[in-house]
Amino acid sequence: MNLYEYEAKSIFAQFGITLPPGARITKPEELRKIHFGFPLTLKCQVLSGGRGKAGGIKFAKDLKEGEELAKNLLELTIGGSKTESLLVEPKVSIARELYLAVTLDRTHGCPIFIGSAEGGIEIESSENVVTLPIPYPFHPYVARDLAKKLGLKGSLLLKVADVATKLYRAFEALDLDLAEINPLVVTTGEDVLALDGKITVNDDALGRQELFKGWQSKHLVDLSDRECRSTMMGLNLVELDGDIGILCNGAGLTMATMDMVKKFGGQPATFLDVGGGSDQEKTLFALEIVNENPNVKVILLNILGGITACDDVAGALVNFMKKNPETKLVVRLRGNNQDVAEKMLAQSGLKLIPDLQSAVKEAVQQSKTPVGAKA
Amino acid sequence: MILVNKDTKILVQGATGKMGASHTKRMLAYGSKLVAGVTPGKGGDTVHGLPVFDTVNEAVEKTGATCSVIFVPPYLALDAGCEAIDAGLDLVVLITEGIPPQDTAKLVAQAKAKGVKLVGPNCPGVITPSETLIGILPGVIFKSGPVGMISRSGTLTYEIALVLSDAGHGQSTCVGVGGDPIKGMGYPELLRAFNDDPATEVIVLIGEIGGTAEEEAAAFIKEHVKKPVVAYIAGQTAPPGKRMGHAGAIISGGKGTAETKMKALTDAGASVATTPNEVVEMVSKARAQLARK
């Protein structure tokens, strides 16, 4: 779950990281009540990246200009994400900028610090990046090692190491996947401030983090309505541009099925992993949500049962076909209680295809048959 | 075969839970040598005829188990995993899905410090066909033979094992390393084990998009693996920036694409298939070549 900048900053503040003063506004006239003076920075609160380039950050020299800019910014949509509110901050006099982040590193299998002596950058494309694995349990010396590697000295080394330590504490305590300050600025008065920040919370940890209870539905804005509803049901749906609705159990098999559909000339409309051990209710929901997509001409259901019982899947299919007799279905079902499932489905007139490659080819062919025609 | 055989003594953590109990039954039916269940507070009970202990230490002391398979809920997995690691087991197989990755990172660090092999999390387990099944794999699909399999996926492993078995290519051992970004054993250590295993002729590596583990595997293959490797990468047509089911299956910042992985593996001398059926063709070819030597 990605957080808005203002939410990330409130977490930084809770862990003792110094911020510039700021206020969140949802109406232009709220600018009149702001207790710090002009010039101001107005920043769109969106969950997508590339905000600066998309014109989502503006400077206002006075109230009149501020209100005008605020009105426009509040209506801005960036990368498909609507502006939720504006964060207003006084313009800071910057002596230098740094980059600081904590994230999990797959290769090392542990958290790492990422730092750069230049801030406000695209970290992926930057040359001057320092990374440092963080041993468990954490001690602040690792943060000092990082500051040293960034070429810092004296009181600045200590101040930056202190911010890095606090950033790690937040990362660990709140189960974050990413805690990033970009830029971390050193003001002309030698204060170290988190000017902008990004936090990604680990989705699997949401159930044990009190702070984020009830936040999830508000933060799924980059997903389609159907993708959101699937997420809330514990299913992983990704919508694509084609016309074959793919529904499978297990991520790897779903991806492989999608790849095969493309290879044999079809176009996937959905990637839906129903997971292991899916019950009837969940399978029926999955079938319905794929069927809701108006682009879907044929549904390819591929279940290879390890945990999943085929008769449960068949039960869901029978129900689905009663409600949606027009929907074209190609079903590959293999695993536990397969014989029971076959009998149940034979009664409904649905024939199972035992091998995957034949099922994929059949689905591709049916997607090319005009709607209404018998396959 | 690697890691496990018919004599491996196994205890089940979370054996009295719904999932743990049903898979305990299946593993017993397969012939796996289960010796104990562990559920805190249920010591003295039995599950499918197995004695249940309160602690792993007690179970190890009483039964001589050397391997644990873990079915506990995600937020209890760090504790259960550390209990298994600290009890001095050789191998810990962590089936649980949805463990917060920072917990996994702590577990991986602990396993490394104690020299314990950790497989998973979010994995189907390990099977040496006809000998032992540790985890949730459907035993009936796997046949005994000379193909060693390493995979990041569950059901895709079953799919490929199914077409391999049907074509007469049984498996020495199949290891599901799991679909999470942070995990225990990875490709290099398992490639090494299969390369050294006299019962394995051909190695099948089943990867997927996300991360750079397949690129690292390719580098390892080039340097150390003498046996033929057939590789398959799932997600060849996955859109960037979307998480495809597994926590680790995501192309981010242009990194982790199937294309770069397939190229790295091809450059390292592996045969790279684009469908499960092509995996079978390539394994057939590799085995035919070995037979001619």
Image (tube, coloured by chain):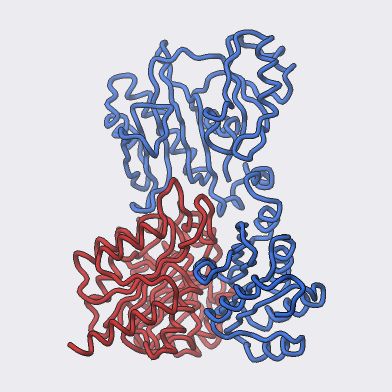
A237, above or below A54, in the image:
below
A184 relative to A343 in the view: left or right: left
Q: How many marks?
A: 0
Q: What residue occupies the far right of the structure in this picture?
A: A323
Across and down, in percent, residue A295 comes to 69, 61
Across and down, in percent, residue A244 comes to 63, 67
* Chain coloured red: B
A28, above or below B185, in the image:
above
Colour assigned to chain A in the rendering is: blue
- Inspect this view and state whether residue B131 appears: yes
Q: Residue at x 64, y 71 (%)?
A: A368
Q: Residue at x 66, y 30 (%)?
A: A76
Quarter location, residue A279: bottom right
In which quadrant of the rendered image does the N terminus of chain B lie?
bottom left
Across and down, in percent, residue B202 comes to 29, 80
Across and down, in percent, residue B274 comes to 42, 70
A27, above or below B103, in the image:
above
Q: Residue at x 65, y 78 (%)?
A: A330
In which quadrant of the rendered image does the C terminus of chain B lie?
bottom left
Give whichever of B41, A272 is nearer the camera. A272
B64 relative to A180 in the view: left or right: left
- Inspect this view and state whether residue B80 appears: no
Q: Residue at x 33, y 46 (%)?
A: A135
B262 relative to A359 in the view: left or right: left
